[in-house]
Image (cartoon, helix red, strand yellow):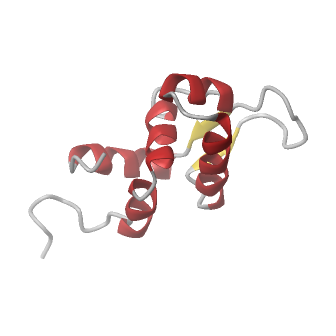
């Protein structure tokens, strides 16, 4: 028997991880609109680049964002949201958790 709201297959651990940090929420929100650099994300979310960079690393560790340029590139590092993170972001928005 499934739940009425279709949330049986939701990775709640990942949802909780994202919503426990304002910065992770801001990063996913911005990346849900399209790929961006840490500086662009920081500017758009009015956050410090250091906070955005930390949130990006934490989200990368969980495979929720991916680096879209070669790893050795130091400037112009462009990040994108993964399919898993898009699904998680949809749940966060649908459930009004952000």
Q: Is residue 9 left or right of residue 37?
A: left
Q: Position of residue 13 (x, y in %)?
A: 41, 69
Q: Position of residue 65 (x, y in %)?
A: 60, 46
Q: Which quarter of the image is occupied by the N terminus?
A: bottom left
Q: Residue furthest right?
A: 72
Identify the residue at horizontal 50%, vertical 48% (top origin): 24
Q: Position of residue 26 (x, y in %)?
A: 46, 39
Foreground residue, 49 or 62?
Answer: 49
Identify the residue at horizontal 70%, vertical 31% (top origin): 78
Q: Is residue 91 left or right of residue 73?
A: left
Identify the residue at horizontal 22%, vertical 46% (top origin): 96
Tell me if residue 1 comes above or below residue 16 in the rendering. Answer: below
Foreground residue, 35 or 97?
Answer: 97
Q: Residue furthest left?
A: 4
Tell me if residue 90 comes above or below residue 37 in the rendering. Answer: below
Foreground residue, 8 or 97?
Answer: 97
Give the total of numbered labels. 0
Identify the residue at horizontal 53%, vertical 26% (top origin): 34
Q: Position of residue 89 (x, y in %)?
A: 38, 46
Tell me if residue 71 comes above or below residue 88 in the rendering. Answer: above
């Amino acid at each position: 028997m499934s739940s009425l709201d279709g949330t049986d297959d939701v990775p709640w651990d990942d949802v909780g991880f994202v919503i426990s940090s304002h910065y992770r929420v801001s990063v996913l929100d911005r990346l849900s609109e399209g790929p961006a650099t840490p500086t662009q994300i920081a500017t758009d979310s009015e956050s410090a680049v250091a906070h955005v960079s930390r949130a990006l690393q934490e989200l990368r560790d969980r495979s929720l964002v991916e680096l879209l340029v070669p790893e050795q590139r130091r400037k112009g590092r462009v990040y994108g949201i993964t399919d898993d993170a898009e699904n998680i972001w949809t749940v966060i928005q649908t459930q009004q958790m952000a």
